[in-house]
Image (tube, rainbow, N blue to C red):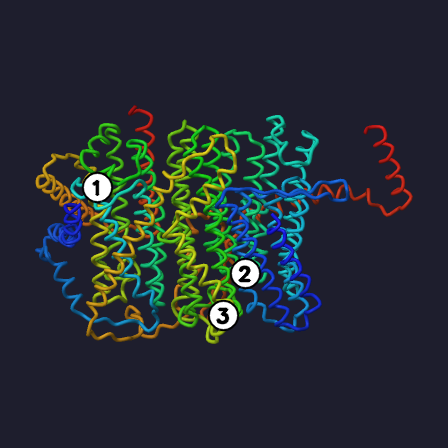
Amino acid sequence: MIQSLIFWLLAILVAPFFAAVILKVKAFFGGKKGPPLLIHYYTLHKLFQKGSVYSTSTTFIFKLGPMVSLCTAVTTLMFLPIAGNQPVCSFSGDIIMILYLLGLGRFFTIAAAMDTASPFEGMGAAREAYFPIICEAAMFMILILLFKLTGDLELSAFLAGDQPIRIWQAAGSPLLFVVIALFIILLTENARVPVDDPATHLELTMIHEVMVLDHSGPDFGFIELGAFCKLFFYAALIARLACPFHVGQPLLDAGLFGVTLLLVYAAVGVTESIMARYRMDKVPKFVLTSFALAFFATIITLEFAK
Amino acid sequence: MHLFLTALLIILSGGILVLPLNRQFTLMKTIGAVSIVAGCLMGLYDAGTKLIRGTSAEISFQYLKQFNLSLQMDGLSAFFLVVIFSVSLLAAIYSFHYMHQSKRCLATAVNYLFFSLLVISMALVVTAADILTFMLCWEVMSLSSFFLVIFNYQAPENRKAGYLYFVFSHIGAMFLLTAFGILYAGTGSFGFGDMTALSNTAKILVFIFAFIGFGSKAGVFPLHVWLPHAHPAAPSHISAVMSGVMIKTGIYGILRIYTLLNFHTPLFGEIVLIAGIVSGILGVVYALGQQDIKRLLAYSSVENIGIILIGMGIGMIGVAYGKPVMAVFGFAGGLLHVLNHAFFKTLLFMGAGMVQHQTGTLAMDSLGGLLKKMKITGTTFLVGSLAISGLPPFNGFVGEFLIYFGGFNGSGLGKTHFAISVLAIISLAVIGGLAMACFTKVMGVAFQGEPRSSVVENADETGLMTMKIPMLVLSGACLLIGIFPNLFIMIAIKATASLGLGYGRLPVEPFLELTGKITRFSALFLALFTLILCLRAWLYRGKSVTHAGTWGCGFTRPTAKMQYTGSSYAASILEFFRIVAPLHEVQSKPTRRFPGKSHYASRVNDVAELYLNTVIVNPFLSIFDKLRWIQHGDIHLYIGYILLAIVVLLFFV
């Protein structure tokens, strides 16, 4: 329990660091030096020092938005078996609850954006309401496969200890499809290229960044931290499935997990460097790919792997 | 049972008493509302104790010395009675300030009379224990709600809506009569208990006819066409009762027929599940395309009926394959969603009613910024939106959580049912996402942002206590069920226990242990939230907080008209579903060098409504047109018809 709590706190603390890896990789591809790896800590520190400017159009929902989105992300991490350790809490069905909890965070992010009366933020909100629907369908498709393989609906039953290896043994190579599907979901849910470009300068083409335009100071810091935690959650899912090995020694496992995580984040960076953002009407097709992959993985596994 | 009948008598006497008192407007409203409230409280107590103790009661009367009218209150009836009485109670309270047109005092009195009749007939429908009683009460229910829908009969579109509802409820009743006719032909008795004697083919026929009949009341796609017309036409507390509980009598009917037939074929489950999936997805897609808040809520009822049917379908498949755990999850989830939907949909209709009451419009794209002017309405509407999107820690999530579990349990079955379970799970996920898009749209466009027209300026909710209290109570209930679902899950499981589904009595504890985790999860979430709240307060201590206009991305003169509209918010999602939700556009584009006036209007078409005329109504009309020569107007020949009919009957019967 204590160990799980420590890992949970650690995950929140290192999430900003890992997110900076993406920037570093992108800078490398661009032939630039790039910001330091601790850049996000500086940003968070700076934001927490500031005061805030609120739009006169906004209501209490605008202030609730950042808190709820941070809270949902942090709660989500409590159920994540970090480095294969038992999570702080888990129960049968927790993964459904987690997916809906992330939905709660999204609801408030959208509501906070609509609160500002800005047409740009409305545009971003409409997209944020749209694309994750397909992601959720894909997530549940993956869940069905994992449920068939493990007979459980618990995140720790999928990812803790040597469970991932068992899943690989039962499913075999089709699980690669699941890893790729999860990667696409990660890119979509966390507003990365090719779905959304966090670094573009034109508000019209953004999704997540444009929704938080009016937030400032500690509120914005909460949003950033929440986004890092959410990214960490998805990256950890992929990392545990991509590198299912479990030694049994906490330090060694944590090290292995950390290295895999670095690779996942680097993969995000590489994707961002070599791809351009899709046109908005092409995005659903890209996201649907993840559903198709998960679907095929399920069919193949259930038909041939027995 | 006597307590129950007394309760109904109180409601009825109040409903009759308002007629002679209609000139004393306030007194009349008080009597009308108080009698319904008192009756509902008594009925609620009676049904609640029966449900928790797990007892049942019955009573029967002789009618015209010929027919036996009998009532029975078992677990399932008691569960629906709890829903009916609690929602009607709050709606009656709400009606006190909502019915404000003192010039239309007689119409208001008549409205209270039919409201009372509606409550009574709904209560009797779910307790009826034979075919005659059931059909009698069913007809009274349909008729009284028809009169409630045309309360504002001056507007032609409301009369049209009432007519459509009338036609649909009678086509539905016709199908029910057919189903009951087959029953009577097979058993020779009006009693509910004798249905098991039927042959299997007859059972399947009865179920299908009854499903169509009940489905038209429940608003199952494609029989939902009346819903989006009737709900906006009715006064808001009536739409709340109709959408919150009256359409659930259809669900009750399906469940009751299923139980009585006692024929556990997976076919029933498949029919119900597929109908649920189609209603669920299409309902929410059409809801997303609406501009009028009440129409949107009506379509969202179609969606929620779909979710309930998905749960029931999973339950029925579970029963058919002897998987009691799956069955209990499905049925309990569906029933719990009946209760939950009754609560949050009533809440949302009441919020919409408040908006209409104060601004005179329900068109989202003329509203905006209402949350600042109507804090309680806006906040409770937010709670309702969160609950209906199925998000934790609110009640909508709990029912869906159980249904998910049932669905995952079903994925262990053979290939066909694996595919169906997968379909159910994925559609639940998609419905959840679309419902969120739909209700962030209502919140964002109508309640947040800046006012889009001048109607919002005078919006205000001071006074009007009886309208605000029910909304507060309901949003409290939504949160309470969401955080402490165990009591409610227990009563839902108890209600399913009376279904007698052939697996005996299951221990409730494992289910409660599972859902008890929701409580702990919610507590954890709220604790973390409080922590973050404190952290935020600490970070903001002594900081300067200033206010300014919204950042216009470099544009310095933004106006409220530039805000994203509801139509544009939903456009890209609807584009994805354009096959089932075709967009109808009317526009005159700006032309020439100095363009004149141009306009653009769009509407999302409901395919069921679109094809209703061309596929069903027109062929029938053309057939009947060809038979018109029979009606020639010659009285001698009419007498000849009668004679001929009698002769034919004498020969053949």
**Disc 2 marks which residue?**
B91
Q: CA distance from mark 3 to mark 1?
A: 53 Å
Give me the residue at 29% from left, 58% from top: A68
**Residue A202, position in %: x, y?**
26, 62
- For mark 2, name the chain: B
- For mark 3, name the chain: B
Mark 2 or 3 closer to N-term? 2
Mark 3 Cα shell of 10 Å, populated few (<14), some (14-19), many (≥20) = few
Mark 1 Cα shell of 10 Å, populated few (<14), some (14-19), many (≥20) = many
Looking at the figure, which quarter contains the C terminus of chain B? Answer: top right
**Disc 3 marks which residue?**
B465
Q: CA distance from mark 2 to mark 3?
A: 13 Å
CB-based contact (under 8 Å), mark 3 and mark 1: no
Q: In the rendered structure, which amino acid carries the disc numbered 2?
A: Ala
Near-viewer residue (B461 or B306)? B461
**Element carrying mark 2:** helix
Q: Is residue B238 above or below residue B496?
A: below
Label drawn at residue B557: none
Q: Is residue B247 above or below residue B461?
A: above
Confirm whether circles 3 and 1 share one chain: no
> Visible in this render: residue B386?
yes
Q: CA distance from mark 1 to mark 2?
A: 50 Å
Near-viewer residue (B76 or B388)? B76
Label drawn at residue A238: 1
